[in-house]
């Protein structure tokens, strides 16, 4: 243990020497200091390893790029990895596994800047590493529970349970909600997905909708819930939900044909697609295909609807983020609620 502590001290001394002595690096540090530390830290988190809370020496947090990071010291202690400085790169090694972190892959928080911004309420290290990347490179499983702010790590040979957190109460929605709106205006709705890191979302009302129509909405929401869209991929409503047929459980409810409402199998699914469309807009995703109804519909604002039909009109959007996203969909009380979440 004494040898390990001596090693960590040596690593930090060498790292500080590299950053403060090498002329080229000094220019980079000057630029980094212009970015407030408070704008880098979105939320501090706890770290659990194999069911137990890890005794961190420094704060771990979700950074501005919506990724979890851990201090260099705590990274070594949690994973038992050795760290070697090679120029401005970090070589991490554990047993037969090793990999490199380039200078742009980790964070530098100068102590003077931390003190200047009065961040004494949390203890920060000077160097931070991307927690998910390091964990996966070393063969650990990792999940993030956004409700309690916890990163959960599992080693390869651990077969025990994950830490248990007190369940959250079902969200109590405010009275007299509008018929539609963004989740940002009703943040309590995000509590339907307490472990997800939600970007944005939208809801619409089915308070006056008949039962067969609501049944169809529920079926289509279930098909979309949990779907992951990787960066650059296009999500198609029709391809994801599939055909709306009686054999697949869909019922007859009003659909729009031309300028008339007529009974049709799968009626109501357009409220699902319209709610998803507005969630994509709120999340600033790229809309690839969208078609309005031929009549004014009442469950979303004007020009915010998206009709779909199998073999015809489709709703498509592209994930223009640099990270995977997840579609979350639920019928809760008298509302259809969609959200877009990051996949941490």
Image (cartoon, helix red, strand yellow):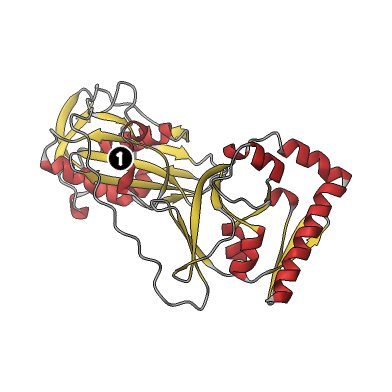
- Residue 242 makes an appearance in the image: no
- Residue 218 makes an appearance in the image: yes
Query: Picture quarter containing residue 163?
Result: bottom left
Percent coordinates x, y for residue 180 in the rendering? 27, 29
Quadrant of the frame with the N terminus: bottom right
Disc 1, SS: helix
* Residue 282 position (above or below residue 67): above
Q: Mark 1 points at which residue?
A: 188
Categorize mark 1 by other alpha carbons within 10 Å: few (<14), some (14-19), many (20+).
some
* Residue 100 position (above or below residue 34): below
Question: In this rendering, would 259 be left or right of 210?
Answer: right
Q: Nearer the viewer, residue 269 or 331?
A: 331
Residue visible at 32% across and 46% down in the picture: 191
* Residue 69 position (above or below residue 302): below
Q: Nearer the viewer, residue 302 or 9?
A: 9
Residue visible at 71% across and 37% down in the picture: 33
Query: Picture quarter containing residue 186?
Result: top left
Residue visible at 30% across and 29% down in the picture: 181
Q: Nearer the viewer, residue 226 or 48?
A: 48
Q: Which of 300 and 257 is in front in this view?
A: 300
**How many badges with numbers are in the image?**
1
Percent coordinates x, y for residue 253 in the rendering? 14, 38
Percent coordinates x, y for residue 95 in the rendering? 68, 77
Percent coordinates x, y for residue 244 in the rendering? 25, 46
């Amino acid at each position: 243990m004494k040898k390990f502590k001596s090693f960590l001290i040596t690593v930090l001394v060498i790292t500080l020497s590299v950053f403060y002595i090498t002329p080229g690096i000094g220019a980079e540090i000057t630029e980094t200091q212009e970015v407030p530390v408070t704008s880098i830290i979105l939320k501090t988190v706890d770290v659990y390893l194999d069911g137990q809370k890890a005794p961190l020496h420094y704060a771990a947090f979700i950074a501005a790029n919506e990724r979890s990071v851990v201090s260099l010291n705590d990274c070594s202690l949690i994973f038992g990895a050795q760290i070697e400085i090679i120029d401005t790169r970090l070589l991490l090694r554990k047993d037969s596994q090793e990999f490199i972190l380039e200078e742009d892959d980790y964070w530098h928080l100068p102590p003077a800047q931390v003190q200047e911004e009065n961040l004494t309420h949390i203890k920060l290290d000077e160097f931070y590493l991307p927690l998910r990347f390091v964990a996966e490179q070393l063969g650990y499983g990792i999940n993030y529970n956004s409700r309690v702010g916890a990163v959960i790590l599992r080693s390869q040979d651990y077969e025990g349970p994950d830490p248990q957190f007190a369940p959250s109460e079902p969200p109590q929605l405010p009275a007299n909600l509008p018929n539609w709106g963004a989740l940002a205006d009703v943040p309590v709705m995000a509590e339907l997905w307490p472990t997800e890191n939600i970007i944005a979302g939208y809801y619409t009302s089915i308070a006056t909708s008949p039962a067969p129509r609501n049944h169809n909405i529920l079926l289509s929401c279930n098909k979309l819930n949990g779907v992951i869209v990787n960066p650059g991929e296009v999500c198609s409503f029709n391809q994801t939900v599939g055909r709306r047929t009686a054999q697949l459980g869909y019922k007859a409810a009003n659909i729009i044909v031309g300028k008339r409402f007529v009974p049709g199998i799968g009626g109501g699914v357009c409220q699902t697609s319209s709610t998803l469309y507005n969630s994509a807009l709120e999340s600033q995703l790229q809309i690839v295909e969208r078609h309005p109804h031929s009549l004014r519909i009442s469950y979303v604002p004007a020009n915010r609807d998206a009709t779909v039909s199998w073999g015809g009109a489709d709703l498509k959007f592209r994930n223009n983020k640099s990270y995977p996203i997840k579609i979350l969909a639920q019928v809760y009380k008298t509302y259809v609620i969609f959200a877009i979440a990051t996949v941490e």
